[in-house]
Amino acid sequence: MPTLLTETIDRLAAFEPVPFPVLSLYLNTQPDSVGRDQFDVFLRKAFAQPLSTYRTASPERESLSRDVSRIERYVAESIQPSANGVAVFACSGADFFEAVQLDAPIDQHALYVGNRPHLYPLVKVDDRYPRYAAVVADTTVARIFVFGTNRLEHEEQVVGQKTKRVKAGGWSQARFQRHVDHYHLHHVKEVVERLDRIVAEEGIGQVILAGDEVIVPLFREQLPPHLADKVVDVVRLDTRAPEREVLEASLESLHQKDADSDTAVVGRLLDEVRAGGLGVAGAQATLEALALGQVDLLLLSADASRIGDAERLAQRDEDHVAGEMPAAVPSESGREAQSGERAANRLVTLARQTSAGVRFIEDPSLLADIGGVGALLRFRV
Protein backbone atom coordinates (compact mmCIF):
# COMPACT_ATOMS: atom_id res chain seq x y z
CA MET A 1 0.00 0.00 0.00
CA PRO A 2 1.64 3.28 -1.06
CA THR A 3 1.75 6.27 1.25
CA LEU A 4 -0.30 9.34 0.43
CA LEU A 5 2.99 11.02 -0.51
CA THR A 6 3.85 8.22 -2.95
CA GLU A 7 0.42 8.52 -4.57
CA THR A 8 0.82 12.29 -4.83
CA ILE A 9 4.24 11.97 -6.48
CA ASP A 10 2.94 9.49 -9.03
CA ARG A 11 0.01 11.77 -9.85
CA LEU A 12 2.33 14.77 -10.27
CA ALA A 13 4.74 12.74 -12.40
CA ALA A 14 1.87 12.04 -14.82
CA PHE A 15 1.25 15.78 -15.32
CA GLU A 16 1.73 16.62 -19.00
CA PRO A 17 3.85 19.67 -19.93
CA VAL A 18 1.82 22.84 -20.53
CA PRO A 19 2.57 26.17 -22.28
CA PHE A 20 2.07 28.08 -19.01
CA PRO A 21 4.58 28.39 -16.13
CA VAL A 22 4.15 25.75 -13.43
CA LEU A 23 5.30 26.80 -9.96
CA SER A 24 6.81 24.22 -7.62
CA LEU A 25 7.36 25.71 -4.17
CA TYR A 26 9.10 23.92 -1.30
CA LEU A 27 9.16 25.33 2.23
CA ASN A 28 10.83 24.10 5.39
CA THR A 29 8.15 25.07 7.92
CA GLN A 30 9.94 23.93 11.04
CA PRO A 31 9.75 26.79 13.56
CA ASP A 32 12.93 28.51 14.70
CA SER A 33 14.20 28.67 18.29
CA VAL A 34 11.45 31.12 19.27
CA GLY A 35 8.67 29.26 17.48
CA ARG A 36 8.41 31.42 14.36
CA ASP A 37 8.32 30.44 10.71
CA GLN A 38 11.19 31.67 8.56
CA PHE A 39 9.92 31.86 4.97
CA ASP A 40 8.17 35.24 4.47
CA VAL A 41 11.29 37.03 3.25
CA PHE A 42 12.17 34.10 1.00
CA LEU A 43 8.73 34.17 -0.65
CA ARG A 44 8.87 37.88 -1.45
CA LYS A 45 12.25 37.57 -3.16
CA ALA A 46 11.54 34.22 -4.84
CA PHE A 47 8.27 35.31 -6.48
CA ALA A 48 9.67 38.59 -7.77
CA GLN A 49 12.29 36.94 -9.98
CA PRO A 50 10.08 34.75 -12.24
CA LEU A 51 7.40 37.45 -12.52
CA SER A 52 9.97 39.82 -13.98
CA THR A 53 10.84 37.38 -16.78
CA TYR A 54 7.38 37.43 -18.41
CA ARG A 55 5.97 40.24 -20.54
CA THR A 56 3.36 42.43 -18.82
CA ALA A 57 -0.24 41.40 -19.66
CA SER A 58 0.93 38.19 -21.35
CA PRO A 59 -1.15 35.05 -20.63
CA GLU A 60 1.91 33.47 -18.96
CA ARG A 61 2.43 36.38 -16.57
CA GLU A 62 -1.26 36.59 -15.74
CA SER A 63 -1.29 32.87 -14.92
CA LEU A 64 1.81 33.27 -12.79
CA SER A 65 0.40 36.30 -10.96
CA ARG A 66 -2.76 34.39 -10.05
CA ASP A 67 -0.65 31.50 -8.81
CA VAL A 68 1.47 33.78 -6.63
CA SER A 69 -1.65 35.29 -5.05
CA ARG A 70 -3.21 31.91 -4.42
CA ILE A 71 -0.04 30.47 -2.92
CA GLU A 72 0.38 33.50 -0.65
CA ARG A 73 -3.19 33.01 0.64
CA TYR A 74 -2.61 29.31 1.13
CA VAL A 75 0.63 29.86 3.06
CA ALA A 76 -0.98 32.53 5.25
CA GLU A 77 -4.17 30.64 6.03
CA SER A 78 -3.84 26.89 5.54
CA ILE A 79 -0.51 25.57 6.85
CA GLN A 80 -1.07 23.40 9.91
CA PRO A 81 1.11 24.03 12.99
CA SER A 82 2.27 20.39 12.90
CA ALA A 83 3.64 20.63 9.35
CA ASN A 84 7.44 20.50 9.05
CA GLY A 85 7.49 20.77 5.27
CA VAL A 86 5.14 22.08 2.59
CA ALA A 87 5.17 21.59 -1.18
CA VAL A 88 2.82 23.57 -3.43
CA PHE A 89 2.36 23.07 -7.18
CA ALA A 90 0.33 25.57 -9.17
CA CYS A 91 -0.52 26.60 -12.72
CA SER A 92 -3.59 28.79 -13.07
CA GLY A 93 -3.40 28.62 -16.87
CA ALA A 94 -3.86 24.84 -16.67
CA ASP A 95 -6.39 25.03 -13.79
CA PHE A 96 -3.97 23.14 -11.55
CA PHE A 97 -3.24 23.52 -7.85
CA GLU A 98 -2.01 20.92 -5.39
CA ALA A 99 -0.51 21.32 -1.93
CA VAL A 100 1.15 18.74 0.31
CA GLN A 101 1.80 19.24 4.02
CA LEU A 102 4.34 16.91 5.58
CA ASP A 103 5.38 15.82 9.04
CA ALA A 104 8.78 15.22 7.44
CA PRO A 105 10.96 18.30 6.92
CA ILE A 106 11.99 19.76 3.56
CA ASP A 107 15.74 20.42 3.37
CA GLN A 108 15.47 24.07 2.30
CA HIS A 109 13.17 26.65 0.78
CA ALA A 110 13.16 26.52 -3.02
CA LEU A 111 11.06 27.71 -5.93
CA TYR A 112 11.14 26.19 -9.42
CA VAL A 113 9.41 27.41 -12.57
CA GLY A 114 8.98 25.00 -15.47
CA ASN A 115 6.25 23.51 -17.60
CA ARG A 116 5.56 20.60 -15.24
CA PRO A 117 5.97 19.95 -11.48
CA HIS A 118 9.53 19.73 -10.15
CA LEU A 119 9.56 16.53 -8.08
CA TYR A 120 13.15 15.92 -7.00
CA PRO A 121 12.88 17.31 -3.40
CA LEU A 122 9.61 15.45 -2.84
CA VAL A 123 11.03 12.14 -4.09
CA LYS A 124 13.98 12.60 -1.69
CA VAL A 125 11.56 12.96 1.22
CA ASP A 126 9.68 9.86 0.09
CA ASP A 127 12.93 7.87 0.05
CA ARG A 128 14.21 9.24 3.35
CA TYR A 129 10.99 8.60 5.28
CA PRO A 130 9.63 5.25 4.06
CA ARG A 131 6.66 3.26 5.27
CA TYR A 132 7.55 0.57 7.82
CA ALA A 133 6.33 -1.26 10.93
CA ALA A 134 7.82 -1.15 14.42
CA VAL A 135 6.96 -3.71 17.11
CA VAL A 136 7.64 -2.81 20.76
CA ALA A 137 6.93 -5.77 22.99
CA ASP A 138 7.48 -7.52 26.29
CA THR A 139 6.07 -10.81 27.54
CA THR A 140 2.58 -9.41 28.17
CA VAL A 141 2.08 -6.34 25.95
CA ALA A 142 2.97 -5.57 22.35
CA ARG A 143 2.41 -2.36 20.39
CA ILE A 144 2.57 -2.51 16.60
CA PHE A 145 3.11 0.82 14.86
CA VAL A 146 2.89 1.63 11.18
CA PHE A 147 4.88 4.75 10.32
CA GLY A 148 5.08 6.60 7.02
CA THR A 149 6.58 9.94 5.98
CA ASN A 150 7.73 10.68 9.55
CA ARG A 151 4.31 10.20 11.16
CA LEU A 152 2.24 7.52 12.84
CA GLU A 153 -0.39 6.08 10.50
CA HIS A 154 -1.93 3.75 13.04
CA GLU A 155 -1.16 1.60 16.08
CA GLU A 156 -2.48 -1.76 17.28
CA GLN A 157 -1.98 -3.36 20.67
CA VAL A 158 -1.88 -7.01 21.70
CA VAL A 159 -2.27 -7.75 25.41
CA GLY A 160 -1.43 -11.18 26.75
CA GLN A 161 -2.20 -12.76 30.09
CA LYS A 162 -0.18 -11.36 32.97
CA THR A 163 1.89 -13.87 34.89
CA LYS A 164 4.39 -13.60 37.67
CA ARG A 165 7.15 -15.81 38.86
CA VAL A 166 6.96 -17.33 42.35
CA LYS A 167 9.59 -18.67 44.64
CA ALA A 168 8.92 -22.33 45.16
CA GLY A 169 10.91 -25.48 45.08
CA GLY A 170 11.11 -28.71 43.15
CA TRP A 171 8.41 -30.05 40.90
CA SER A 172 5.86 -27.28 41.66
CA GLN A 173 8.25 -24.54 40.57
CA ALA A 174 9.13 -26.32 37.34
CA ARG A 175 5.47 -26.90 36.56
CA PHE A 176 4.61 -23.26 37.21
CA GLN A 177 7.50 -22.11 35.04
CA ARG A 178 6.27 -24.27 32.16
CA HIS A 179 2.86 -22.65 32.66
CA VAL A 180 4.38 -19.15 32.43
CA ASP A 181 6.45 -20.05 29.36
CA HIS A 182 3.33 -21.37 27.67
CA TYR A 183 1.56 -18.03 28.10
CA HIS A 184 4.59 -16.12 26.85
CA LEU A 185 4.78 -18.29 23.76
CA HIS A 186 1.06 -17.93 23.12
CA HIS A 187 1.40 -14.15 23.41
CA VAL A 188 4.30 -14.04 20.96
CA LYS A 189 2.45 -16.20 18.45
CA GLU A 190 -0.53 -13.88 18.64
CA VAL A 191 1.67 -10.82 18.06
CA VAL A 192 3.44 -12.49 15.11
CA GLU A 193 0.10 -13.42 13.58
CA ARG A 194 -1.16 -9.83 13.92
CA LEU A 195 2.08 -8.41 12.51
CA ASP A 196 1.97 -10.81 9.57
CA ARG A 197 -1.55 -9.71 8.72
CA ILE A 198 -0.62 -6.00 8.88
CA VAL A 199 2.49 -6.50 6.75
CA ALA A 200 0.55 -8.45 4.12
CA GLU A 201 -2.48 -6.15 3.99
CA GLU A 202 -0.49 -2.91 3.89
CA GLY A 203 2.48 -3.94 1.79
CA ILE A 204 5.05 -3.24 4.52
CA GLY A 205 8.60 -3.91 3.36
CA GLN A 206 10.61 -3.30 6.55
CA VAL A 207 10.12 -4.13 10.23
CA ILE A 208 11.94 -2.89 13.33
CA LEU A 209 11.72 -5.02 16.50
CA ALA A 210 12.13 -3.60 20.00
CA GLY A 211 12.18 -5.66 23.15
CA ASP A 212 14.26 -7.18 25.92
CA GLU A 213 16.48 -10.26 26.09
CA VAL A 214 13.47 -12.48 26.93
CA ILE A 215 10.99 -11.52 24.21
CA VAL A 216 13.32 -10.97 21.25
CA PRO A 217 14.61 -14.60 21.04
CA LEU A 218 11.01 -15.83 21.25
CA PHE A 219 10.07 -13.55 18.37
CA ARG A 220 13.01 -14.74 16.30
CA GLU A 221 11.92 -18.35 16.78
CA GLN A 222 8.30 -17.73 15.79
CA LEU A 223 8.75 -15.44 12.78
CA PRO A 224 8.03 -17.20 9.48
CA PRO A 225 10.84 -16.82 6.90
CA HIS A 226 8.97 -14.29 4.76
CA LEU A 227 8.49 -12.07 7.82
CA ALA A 228 11.97 -12.63 9.27
CA ASP A 229 13.43 -11.37 5.98
CA LYS A 230 11.75 -8.01 6.55
CA VAL A 231 13.29 -7.43 10.01
CA VAL A 232 16.11 -4.94 9.51
CA ASP A 233 17.11 -4.30 13.13
CA VAL A 234 16.39 -4.85 16.83
CA VAL A 235 16.50 -1.91 19.27
CA ARG A 236 15.88 -1.48 22.98
CA LEU A 237 12.68 0.35 23.90
CA ASP A 238 10.21 0.11 26.78
CA THR A 239 6.65 -0.82 25.85
CA ARG A 240 5.52 2.39 27.55
CA ALA A 241 7.76 4.56 25.38
CA PRO A 242 5.92 7.55 23.86
CA GLU A 243 4.98 7.31 20.20
CA ARG A 244 7.51 10.01 19.21
CA GLU A 245 10.34 8.18 20.94
CA VAL A 246 9.46 4.98 19.09
CA LEU A 247 9.36 6.86 15.78
CA GLU A 248 12.71 8.59 16.30
CA ALA A 249 14.53 5.47 17.53
CA SER A 250 13.16 3.21 14.80
CA LEU A 251 13.76 5.76 12.02
CA GLU A 252 17.35 6.34 13.16
CA SER A 253 17.92 2.59 13.08
CA LEU A 254 16.34 2.35 9.63
CA HIS A 255 18.54 5.12 8.24
CA GLN A 256 21.67 3.49 9.64
CA LYS A 257 20.78 0.12 8.13
CA ASP A 258 20.03 1.75 4.78
CA ALA A 259 23.41 3.48 4.82
CA ASP A 260 25.09 0.18 5.69
CA SER A 261 23.35 -1.59 2.80
CA ASP A 262 24.14 1.15 0.24
CA THR A 263 27.56 -0.41 -0.31
CA ALA A 264 26.03 -3.78 -1.14
CA VAL A 265 23.45 -2.30 -3.53
CA VAL A 266 26.05 -0.22 -5.38
CA GLY A 267 28.37 -3.25 -5.46
CA ARG A 268 25.62 -5.28 -7.10
CA LEU A 269 25.11 -2.53 -9.68
CA LEU A 270 28.82 -2.37 -10.53
CA ASP A 271 29.00 -6.16 -10.85
CA GLU A 272 26.09 -6.10 -13.33
CA VAL A 273 27.67 -3.29 -15.33
CA ARG A 274 31.07 -5.03 -15.53
CA ALA A 275 29.44 -8.29 -16.61
CA GLY A 276 27.26 -6.61 -19.23
CA GLY A 277 24.22 -7.71 -17.24
CA LEU A 278 21.21 -5.93 -15.79
CA GLY A 279 22.90 -2.66 -14.94
CA VAL A 280 23.85 0.67 -16.53
CA ALA A 281 26.15 3.42 -15.26
CA GLY A 282 26.27 7.15 -15.89
CA ALA A 283 23.61 9.78 -16.48
CA GLN A 284 23.20 9.35 -20.24
CA ALA A 285 22.96 5.54 -20.22
CA THR A 286 20.57 5.68 -17.28
CA LEU A 287 18.39 8.27 -19.01
CA GLU A 288 18.16 6.10 -22.12
CA ALA A 289 17.24 3.04 -20.05
CA LEU A 290 14.55 5.02 -18.22
CA ALA A 291 13.08 6.21 -21.52
CA LEU A 292 12.75 2.56 -22.62
CA GLY A 293 11.15 1.46 -19.34
CA GLN A 294 14.09 -0.83 -18.53
CA VAL A 295 14.91 0.52 -15.08
CA ASP A 296 13.88 -1.39 -11.99
CA LEU A 297 15.81 0.71 -9.45
CA LEU A 298 17.41 4.10 -10.02
CA LEU A 299 20.47 4.77 -7.84
CA LEU A 300 21.30 8.42 -7.42
CA SER A 301 23.79 10.34 -5.31
CA ALA A 302 21.95 12.18 -2.53
CA ASP A 303 24.08 15.21 -3.45
CA ALA A 304 22.74 16.23 -6.87
CA SER A 305 25.84 18.32 -7.62
CA ARG A 306 27.76 15.02 -7.88
CA ILE A 307 25.88 13.96 -11.01
CA GLY A 308 28.35 13.91 -13.88
CA ASP A 309 27.50 15.43 -17.24
CA ALA A 310 24.57 17.17 -15.56
CA GLU A 311 24.84 20.34 -17.62
CA ARG A 312 24.49 18.51 -20.93
CA LEU A 313 21.72 16.32 -19.55
CA ALA A 314 19.80 19.35 -18.29
CA GLN A 315 20.24 21.22 -21.57
CA ARG A 316 18.76 18.31 -23.51
CA ASP A 317 15.70 18.15 -21.30
CA GLU A 318 12.81 18.90 -23.66
CA ASP A 319 10.55 19.61 -20.71
CA HIS A 320 12.84 22.31 -19.38
CA VAL A 321 11.65 25.91 -19.64
CA ALA A 322 14.16 28.76 -19.73
CA GLY A 323 14.11 30.32 -16.29
CA GLU A 324 13.53 27.12 -14.31
CA MET A 325 15.58 27.63 -11.21
CA PRO A 326 15.99 26.75 -7.57
CA ALA A 327 15.71 30.06 -5.73
CA ALA A 328 18.03 28.87 -2.95
CA VAL A 329 21.28 27.08 -3.83
CA PRO A 330 24.72 27.14 -2.20
CA SER A 331 26.44 30.29 -3.46
CA GLU A 332 29.83 28.64 -3.85
CA SER A 333 28.51 25.99 -6.24
CA GLY A 334 25.25 27.45 -7.54
CA ARG A 335 25.68 26.47 -11.18
CA GLU A 336 26.67 22.88 -10.38
CA ALA A 337 23.84 22.52 -7.87
CA GLN A 338 21.27 23.93 -10.29
CA SER A 339 22.36 21.75 -13.22
CA GLY A 340 22.66 18.69 -11.00
CA GLU A 341 19.21 19.11 -9.54
CA ARG A 342 17.62 19.72 -12.94
CA ALA A 343 19.27 16.54 -14.20
CA ALA A 344 18.24 14.64 -11.06
CA ASN A 345 14.69 15.91 -11.40
CA ARG A 346 14.49 14.62 -14.96
CA LEU A 347 15.77 11.21 -13.90
CA VAL A 348 13.47 10.77 -10.89
CA THR A 349 10.43 12.01 -12.82
CA LEU A 350 11.05 9.43 -15.55
CA ALA A 351 11.56 6.79 -12.87
CA ARG A 352 8.18 7.52 -11.29
CA GLN A 353 6.49 7.63 -14.68
CA THR A 354 7.76 4.11 -15.41
CA SER A 355 7.16 2.62 -11.92
CA ALA A 356 10.88 2.33 -11.19
CA GLY A 357 12.13 2.54 -7.63
CA VAL A 358 14.41 5.40 -6.57
CA ARG A 359 17.18 5.05 -4.00
CA PHE A 360 19.42 7.92 -2.90
CA ILE A 361 22.96 6.93 -1.92
CA GLU A 362 24.21 9.07 0.96
CA ASP A 363 27.94 8.38 0.60
CA PRO A 364 28.99 10.28 -2.56
CA SER A 365 32.14 8.20 -2.97
CA LEU A 366 30.13 5.03 -3.72
CA LEU A 367 28.84 6.34 -7.07
CA ALA A 368 31.68 8.78 -7.77
CA ASP A 369 33.36 6.60 -10.42
CA ILE A 370 30.17 6.38 -12.51
CA GLY A 371 29.10 9.99 -12.34
CA GLY A 372 26.76 9.76 -9.36
CA VAL A 373 24.02 7.77 -11.09
CA GLY A 374 23.24 4.27 -12.33
CA ALA A 375 20.38 1.80 -12.51
CA LEU A 376 19.53 -1.85 -12.04
CA LEU A 377 17.43 -3.07 -14.97
CA ARG A 378 14.36 -5.22 -15.43
CA PHE A 379 15.52 -6.44 -18.85
CA ARG A 380 18.09 -5.86 -21.59
CA VAL A 381 17.26 -4.76 -25.15
Image (cartoon, helix red, strand yellow):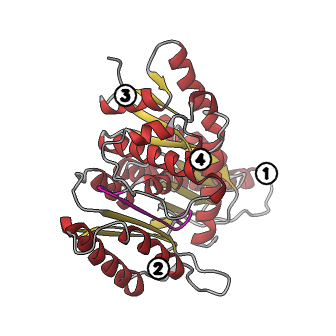
Q: How far apart are the alpha carbons under marks 3 and 4?
A: 22 Å
Tell whether 288 sits left or right of 63: right
The amino acid beneath tag 4 is Asp
Q: Residue at x 62, y 37 (%)?
A: 261
- List the residue tagged with mark 1: 170
Whether residue 302 can be seen here: no
- Mark 2, Cα crowd under 10 Å, few <14 / some 14-19 / many 20+, is few
Which of pointers 3 and 4 lies earlier in the amino acid sequence?
3
Horizontal side, residue 33 vs residue 135: left or right: right
Q: Mark 4 points at which residue?
A: 303
Number of disc labels? 4
**Identity of the amino acid at label 2?**
Arg
Quarter of the image where one finds residue 71: bottom left
Q: Alpha-carbon neighbours of circle 3 within 10 Å: few (<14), some, or many (≥20)?
A: many
What segment carries the magenta color? 106-117
Task: Please state the horizontal and vertical placement of residue 245, each as a whole percent of the image.
Answer: 63, 68
112 within the magenta span: yes
> Could you say whether the residue bearing mark 1 is in a helix, strand or loop?
helix
| Tag 1: amino acid | Gly
